[in-house]
Amino acid sequence: MAAARQPVPRGSQPATREEIIARVREMYRRHPFPPARRKHTYRHHVAYVRRFLDELGIDPRGREFGDFACGTGLMMLDYAQAFPDTTFVGYDLSAVSVERANATFAAEGVSNAHAQVQDIMQMGDRDRFAYIVSWGTIHHLPDPAEGVAILARALLPGGILRTGIYGYYGNWERRVQQEMLRTLAGDGDPLDFDRRIALVREWAGADRNFKNYYTAPPVDLHDDDWVVDEFLHVWENHLKLADIVTWLEANGLQVLRLTDYYDAEIALDVAEHSTSPPFVARVKGLSFVEQCAVIEMIVRPYWISLLARKHG
Ligand SMILES: C[S@@+](CC[C@H](N)C(=O)[O-])C[C@H]1O[C@@H](n2cnc3c(N)ncnc32)[C@H](O)[C@@H]1O
């Protein structure tokens, strides 16, 4: 008798860390990110970081900055052009993305940035970088807690880490959309992207219930690479603000600031988010990590970016 089909197929889950890495690498080999046709600039992000570093009295000139994982290098390009006296090192799992990043730097005449193929989980740098950005990657690592420890280790004492991950509550709609697609696609090869992309278009392209304003920025449904990254990812952990704050603190970093995808600051003070003085007083009696958990439940940002500084 044929096995009963699960009501909500989970896909064949990779069993080991090596299988996860292999699957993620293959996904970004076929569908590098960000896509070749630029959807938006990271110049605002870079200007925000510059102001932040200025406020802390950190001079970027002559220092090494890291982008873990840089993908096709468009964010790194904006950084390198804005900080011409800083050297940028980009790591990524995908050789296709790294090749494209270096070709873009060459085409733009940028000589202070270089990308190389490197699995972050195998990265051995210690006390090297004055600043590291890791945008949209920690949630795709096989062990995000260990990934944060690796990033922290690579920072110089006093160095700054900027992380960017999906929010937990703010991503509910997108997770439902991913589950919808798993239900349509059924079990089988999660790397069978052509069939799955066609399913996304069949549904999202024409159904009045599909909403494209949950994601930041909104997905271009005509762009295969974007569709795969957003709806058909082969490995995505659903992390909470409290998780990442816990891991940063455990690795000797002090959390200084929280923003959304577009650098709008989200106060790490519950009094800014509530009109109930007794509630605020109660939350303020909790640990910082618990306060962060409450703030995420109130604000429910789609994207969580933390700026944290390594002690020392
Ligand atoms: C969503 S993309 C983000 C790219 C870029 N940071 C951006 O925001 O434009 C995720 C990237 O992480 C890379 N990646 C995933 N796991 C990795 C690992 N273990 N080591 C290095 N890179 C990894 C992928 O190859 C991919 O380029």
Image (cartoon, grey):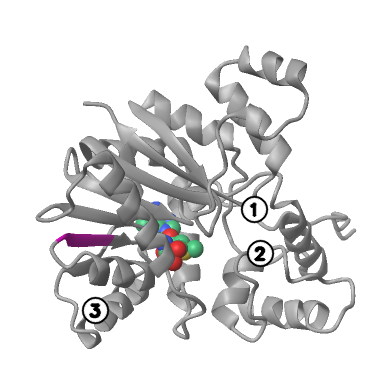
In screen coordinates, is 186 left or right of 34? right
* Residue visible at 62% across and 67% down in the picture: 230
- From what the image shows, is residue 25 above or below residue 256? below
Mark 3 crowdedness (10 Å alpha carbons): few <14, some 14-19, many ≥20: many
Kind of residue sitting beneath label 1: Tyr
Question: Which residues make up the magenta segment?
Answer: 86-90
Mark 2: secondary structure: loop
Image quarter for ligand 1 equals bottom left
**Residue at mark 1 to residue at mark 2: CA–CA distance:** 7 Å
Q: What separation in Å lies between label 3 and label 1 (alpha carbons)?
A: 30 Å
Q: What number is the disc on residue 215?
A: 2
Q: Judge whether residue 216 can be spotted in this image.
A: yes
Give the residue at mark 3: 105
Of 17 and 276, the residue lying toward us: 276
Q: Compared with residue 248, is residue 40 higher up or lower down, i.e. above or below?
A: below
Q: Which mark is residue 27?
A: none
Q: Which residue is mark 1?
A: 302
